[in-house]
Image (cartoon, grey):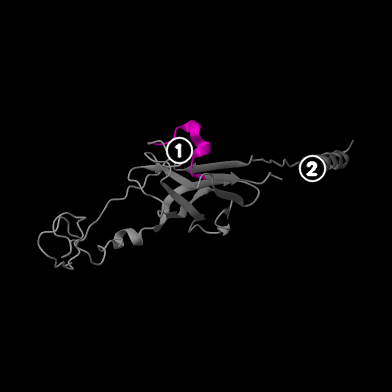
Amino acid sequence: MNIFGKLALSGLVLSVASVASAASVSGSTDFRVTLPEVLVLYHWDDAHLTLTDIVTPTAANDSDAREISDTTTRNLTDVLGKSAYTVEGTAVNSSIPDVFVSSASANVTLKNSWAVRSISSGDVTLGLSVQQDTLKNVNNQNSTITVSKAGLASTGTGIGGSATAMTIPSGWQGMQGDINFTLDLTKANNSGEYNTRGIAGAAGESANATDTFLLTLTGLSAS
């Protein structure tokens, strides 16, 4: 083979080698993650409101804090020598002190008493119900305080629904809020502790069914 033939053959080999090295094959891998639905509910287990008596001294209070003097003089003029005398007049002033009138119905807030974290396919729902609306005095169970108008409240972003079925956006950053309700003290005739069981002290873990409020967090099945 002459020199020109050798050069032509060498060029052909180089050309084929060049084409072969330029070829490529690509393949991709898709990676997926599926998270489970996760619901976390934080809540107070016990709350105790202790009310104290605050008395504002006035001229009508001669000495003791609860001695309410009626300054009207009742007069009787009668003859000497009788075995009995009755001084009559208007009945003693027994109006209820303002401190009791104003507290017959009281609004109560359990501030930041619950919180929620969740991972769900949509908004989760926090429900509130009153399991036991009557608080009984531990010394006389006929003396009671009534709980009413219970509702949830929160300043969190995206909160919806109602006071008893609040919708909360899914998110692990957490959302917290309050429980609001009203106390009716008009049938509270004894001092001391009042609770749903009529037995002094905090409820045990096994007594959940007798707790005043029930919080229920409900999610959505992941799609």
Q: Nearer the viewer, residue 129 or 27?
A: 129
The residue located at (34%, 61%) in the rendering is: 101
The residue located at (49%, 40%) in the rendering is: 211
Quarter in which the N terminus is drawn: top right
Disc marking residue 147: none
Mark in front: 1 vs 2 = 1
Q: Label 1's element?
A: loop
- Residue sticking out furthest to the left: 80
Pinpoint residue 113: horizontal percent, then vertical percent. 44, 48
The residue located at (13%, 56%) in the rendering is: 63
Q: Nearer the viewer, residue 143 or 200?
A: 143
Residue identifier under label 2 = 23
Pinpoint residue 34: horizontal percent, then vertical percent. 67, 40
Q: Residues within 10 Å of mark 1 (few under 14, many from 20)?
A: many
Disc marking residue 197: 1
Amino acid marked by disc 1: Arg
Part of the protein shown in magenta: 201-213
The residue located at (33%, 43%) in the rendering is: 192
Q: Is residue 123 above or below residue 137?
A: below
Quarter of the image holding residue 45?
top left
Q: Is residue 211 magenta?
A: yes
Label 1 to label 2: alpha-carbon separation: 82 Å
Pinpoint residue 128: horizontal percent, then vertical percent. 55, 49
Q: Nearer the viewer, residue 210 or 86?
A: 86
Residue 149 shows in this picture: yes
